[in-house]
Amino acid sequence: MGQPIISRAPDVMGGAAVFHGTRVPVQTLLDYLEAGESIDDFLAGFPSVTRAQVIAFLEEAKDRMVDSVS
């Protein structure tokens, strides 16, 4: 993806990290996954977020986690 995955601005959702170009907090995806919901369930509830954004976010999170313990 050529654009940012997440963004943060004080005037959007109180400065929470959101999927870029949306008002959907990244925390909402994490809450869905923690509750055992699927990515498809999340995307159905938040159609402004694309599958590519979700996958890119999860890949970035994975890479950062692996790098932090290497």
Image: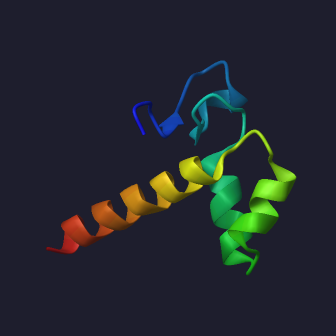
5 over 40 or under it: above or below:
above
Q: Position of residue 9 (x, y in %)?
A: 56, 23
Q: Nearer the viewer, residue 15 or 42?
A: 42
Q: Residue at x 37, y 67 (%)?
A: 62
Drawn side of residue 27 relative to residue 62, left or right: right
Question: Residue furthest toward the bottom?
Answer: 36
Q: Nearer the viewer, residue 68 or 63?
A: 63
Q: Quadrant of the C terminus?
A: bottom left
Drawn side of residue 48 relative to residue 26, left or right: right
Q: Nearer the viewer, residue 36 or 41?
A: 41
Q: Quadrant of the N terminus?
A: top left
Question: Residue furthest toward the left?
Answer: 70
Drawn side of residue 43 relative to residue 11, left or right: right
Q: Residue at x 68, y 24 (%)?
A: 12
> Splitting the image into 4 quarters, where does residue 32 fall?
bottom right
38 over 56 or under it: above or below:
below
> Splitting the image into 4 quarters, where does residue 29 fall?
bottom right
> Splitting the image into 4 quarters, where does residue 48 fall?
top right
Question: Residue furthest toward the top?
Answer: 11
Q: Residue at x 30, y 60 (%)?
A: 64
7 over 33 or under it: above or below:
above
Q: Position of residue 40 (x, y in %)?
A: 75, 66
Q: How is the structure coloured here?
A: rainbow
Q: Position of residue 22 (x, y in %)?
A: 69, 32
Q: Residue at x 47, y 53 (%)?
A: 56
Drawn side of residue 57 relative to residue 19, left or right: left
